[in-house]
Amino acid sequence: MARRRRWSLTKAASWTFSVVALAGIAGLAALFAVQSLPVWKHAGWGFLTGREWFFRESLFGAAPMIYGTLVVAAVALALAAPVGIGAAVFTSEFLPRRWRLAVKLAIELLAGVPSVVYGLLGILLLRNWVYDALEPFEPLSGDTLLTAGVLLAVMLLPTVMTLAEDALRGVPGAQRAAARGLGLTATETVLHVTLPQAAPGILAAVLLSLGRALGEMIAVFLVVGRQDNQWPAPVHSVRPLLEAGQTLSSKLGGAEINIAYGDPLHWAAMAGLALVLLLLVTTLTLLGARLRRTDHAT
């Protein structure tokens, strides 16, 4: 009876905290939606597709900031995902247990480093390296979308590696033993047995990391340059990667949020940016969490 009661209390507490968390997210979304209504009435869908942001002229186009957010996240994932997944495979499948635990602990410690520390390292080191590397292209400075993406890749690497390693370790050892018994080498076992079965968990790791990439503010704010109205022409051009830009999070973390507070329309535009960012991050996080549950269930 006592055991059943303890389980009931645990289950009730879990449900309570889950409901509180969901209510908090729903409350934030509702608050941002209500406060952003004036800008939706003023600009309509042009708020999302507009390419110009001049608050003194009541022009609010979020497209360059959405573009900057997606580009920085894409660069970060393009660099962090292969390295993180490769490190996870090596750690999970080839390292002895003693070394595996040591490496995983070191990687998880990196995940606990504050964002502002990464940002300061980006200012002191990374942007100078990027500027020197891009010197043939004559960049104005080392504060670019590419710099932000590279810095974010370093920050995401522990998350990708840890979650991908958990997915790989979730594959039953009997599957590996059966594959080796059929004559497959260790590498063939990883390629044809372990990775296919862990694929949902690895995809979840990438989506959860992408959710963090979209919402990262401090480190990106310090190295992205914070230049408004940077829209690529043509849209597939890579030149904007070599220039200063703006993301949704860096815009919300800048001084303009204080300027906007005295103007209802301007404030509504900032709330609209927050709503878009919240919806993007929440959607990716929920998709990643669902894939992780599916991976563990199988």
Image (cartoon, rainbow, N blue to C red):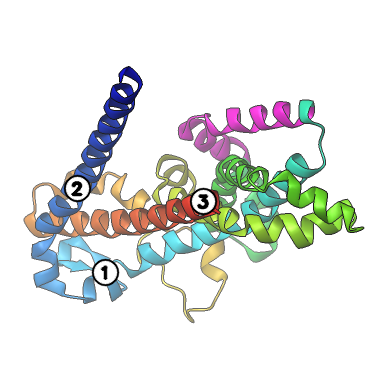
| Residue ID for mark 3 | 297
Which-is-in-front pick, marks 1 and 2? Answer: 2
Residue 121 included in the magenta stretch of the image = yes
Above or below, 111 relative to 84 = above
For the record, the magenta segment spans: 99-125
| Residue ID for mark 1 | 61
Amino acid type at image mark 2 = Leu
Q: Which mark is residue 28?
A: 2
| Residue 87: image location, x then y, percent | 72, 45
* Residue at the (19%, 50%) spot, across then down: 26
Residue 141 visible in the shown view: no
* Residue at the (53%, 29%) spot, across then down: 113
Q: CA distance from mark 3 to mark 1?
A: 43 Å
Residue 135 relative to residue 285: left or right: right
Q: Residues within 10 Å of mark 3 (few under 14, many from 20)?
A: few
Q: Residues within 10 Å of mark 2 (few under 14, many from 20)?
A: some
| Residue 61: image location, x then y, percent | 26, 69
Residue 98 relative to residue 69: left or right: right
The residue lying toward the viewer, choosing from 168 and 270, is 168
The residue lying toward the viewer, choosing from 292 and 44, is 292
Which tag, 1 or 2, sits closer to the chain's start?
A: 2
| Residue 282: image location, x then y, percent | 34, 53
* Residue at the (42%, 58%) spot, across then down: 287
The kind of secondary structure element at disc 1 is loop
Magenta segment's dominant SS is: helix
Looking at the figure, which quarter contains the C terminus? bottom right
Amino acid type at image mark 1 = Gly
Looking at the figure, which quarter contains the N terminus? top left
